[in-house]
Image (spheres, rainbow, N blue to C red):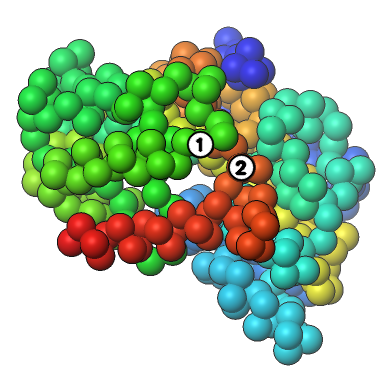
Amino acid sequence: MSSKFVIGRRKVIKSTGALAALAAVGPFFHVRPALADKGELVVVSWGGSWAKSMREVIFADFEKASGLTVKDDTPPENAKLKAMSDAGNVTWDVLETDLPAIQTMIGNGLLDPMDYSKIDKAKLDKIPKELHSSHAVGNKLYSFNIVYNSKTFPTGRHPKSWAEVWDGKAFPGSRSFAFRGGISPQLEIALLADGVAVDKLYPLDVERAWKSMDRLRPLVKKWYQGHAEAIQLVTSGEIDIANTVGSRGITAKRAGAPIDVEYNQGKLGADYWCVTKGSKNKKAALEFINFALDAKRQAGMVQRDPYGPANADAFNHLTAAEAKDLTTSPENIKRQFWINEDWWGKPGADGKNENQKQKERFAEWMLKKG
């Protein structure tokens, strides 16, 4: 799979004028003057700097091309969408969220199947097959990595595996992992720390994973609530090693923070585009998704926020320096593994999937060990 992510020789993405932006849209738009008021499309993401970048890189050009006004909302939560659906008034059109959330929405009948015939084949061919889901298509990639304070552990002398993160004698210092209501435990990482090979992870040995979590517990000084908190803790030196999204660490590193990221054994995941059932703008929603998956636009997004682009052709519009710190660069992606969403999302005999069951167990484990 990593061979799909190849860095081109072209340099930094060049700014495009209005005509160039329109020409790059693909077969589902024709170059024409935008109409002043054709309605609005509501795109829902997790907000923050990523939403700001979408406004600059994607929304503005899409508005010019389509004549629609793009409005954004946050967060793309199942409960809010279900309430809209139950009331018969779905105001959201396009969602960007992760697959576990999407699986829940599918179960509640809240999403339309993805109509891949409306997405350019040339773009789809550059997006890994793992990201072609029945109701969604991958947009941005991230991974849970070893993020460390580079003053405590100068690069090269830092922990390079989860087994080393679990080793408080060889690598002394405080750790931080995530815990809050509704978050899944890092069972794959616990198994890697216990010596399980990457290609032998699934199906997960749940009991072995929780025993490994028991060994981690004394090293965790703080369970963080959000990734921004994790980065702040590592930046300040209160925490020496965190398990968090590496892209956040790279953003802080570029801003001068004493942070670096180890990609070995990183757990790859993605946020996906999907279309709500009940949207009054289905055609425009699919046109927007096709527009957003353009390689140049994906490159523009990750230049601002260093996540991995789903479209491998985006690397043709990035410099080698820009690509080096992205989770899907050829050197980084081959050292990581994909989360098995089917294992987490498939319902068991009791009707619950592993995502639900392990979240509940995580909450109980925290109370018992607290």
Query: Relative to 357, is 278 on the left or the right?
Result: right
Q: 10 Å neighbourhood of mark 1: few (<14), some, or many (≥20)?
A: some
User: Whole-percent x and y of residue 86?
Assistant: 73, 85
Q: Toward the viewer: 126 or 175? A: 175
Mark count: 2
* Quarter that holds the N terminus: top right
Q: In terms of secondary structure, where does tag 2 sit? A: helix
Residue on which the image places disc 2: 343
Q: Toward the viewer: 223 or 370? A: 370
Above or below — where is 360 with respect to 197? below
User: Whole-percent x and y of residue 259?
Assistant: 21, 33
Q: Residue at x 59, y 76 (%)?
A: 79
Q: Quadrant of residue 147?
A: top left
Residue on which the image places disc 1: 204
Above or below — where is 131 with respect to 12? below
Above or below — where is 351 with respect to 9? below
Q: Are marks 2 and 1 in contact (CB under 8 Å)?
A: yes
What is the distance, in whole Å, between disc 2 and disc 1 at their CAs? Answer: 8 Å
Amino acid type of the residue that numbered disc 1 sits on in the rendered structure: Leu
Amino acid type of the residue that numbered disc 2 sits on in the rendered structure: Trp
Q: Is residue 19 visible?
A: no
Above or below — where is 215 with respect to 79? above
Tell me which label, 2 or 1, sits earlier in the chain.
1
User: Whole-percent x and y of residue 284?
Assistant: 82, 60
